[in-house]
Amino acid sequence: MTEMLFRLQNPSCAPITFTSHSIERIAAGHKTQTRRTMYPQPEGEVLVQDPKSPRHWHLKNDPKQRWRCPYGEVGDRLWVRQVWARIEPFPNVLEDFRMPVPWRVEKNPVLLHYWRQRVIFLSDFPGKKPEECGRGATDNVWRSPGTMPRWAARDRLEVTEIRTERLQEISADDAFAEGVESAEARRHRHGDFSPGALGYVNYGPRRGYNFETPQESFATLWDALNGRQNPWAANCWVWVISFRRLDECAA
């Protein structure tokens, strides 16, 4: 069996975290790309992919300085972590509610179905507390994406492209692939904006349509998520991951 055939039959599956807003854009088909900061930051100007090991990248002039992409390579799958909560239809069970052993759930379709019925996501109930979602008893705590076990993940993505670049090198097409919205698109989606609104969304503290280009809009989206550690102005190196959403039956 060739390595390529083996990889097609046995794709890797790594976690990736998205905000509730990003989850909505992915589900609607308007977000097919994401940028993630590289650690540690390369000090050179050109990174190239190792043809013998596609998960690894190195400086063009110094192959010894290497980075392994934590999101795999083309064809690999990503399971999506997001804000979640646990529920239980029978209130008397909740007091002794314990999460199951992950590997046992993943290997048993019956257990998997049972436990997935006991998970809800903030992206489905924006602005609500878990107890307000009408899905049974809950401890009323939205949980961090980092605590989500793989069996609870609803969304799976397939990596279609990975590359590296400086953050500010993003093109207009890539900004749209990142989920940036124009005034017109958002108006059609929400139906609550002035017909005269122009430009692209400002995702910063001063909301509105202040930008002429999608790249400027994306800069505010990036800073809203990553501005404390890796602001847009720093122009850091990033992994650029393009993906497609898989149907649940294919995940």
Image (cartoon, rainbow, N blue to C red):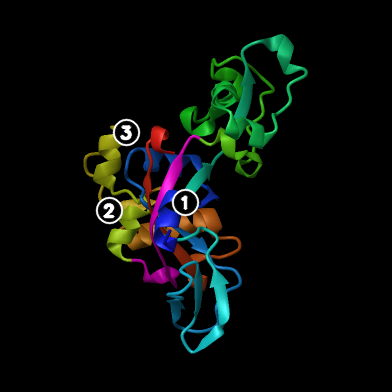
Q: CA distance from mark 2 to mark 3?
A: 16 Å
Q: Secondary structure at mark 1?
A: loop
Q: Secondary structure at mark 2?
A: loop
Residue 138 as seen in the image, left or right of residue 204: right
The residue that label 1 is drawn on is: 11
From the viewer's perspective, is residue 77 above or below residue 231?
above
Q: Note whether residue 192 is visible.
A: no
The residue that label 2 is drawn on is: 199
Q: Which segment did they paint magenta?
A: 154-170
From the viewer's perspective, is residue 72 above or below residue 97?
below
Q: CA distance from mark 3 to mark 1?
A: 38 Å
Residue 138 position within the rendered picture, expressed as x and y whole percent measured from the top left:
65, 20
Question: Which is more foreground, mark 2 or mark 1?
Answer: 1
From the viewer's perspective, is residue 41 above or below residue 133?
below
Q: Which mark is residue 90?
A: none
Depth check, front residue: 28 or 191: 28
Residue at 34 percent across and 58 percent down: it is 175
* Amino acid type, label 2: Gly
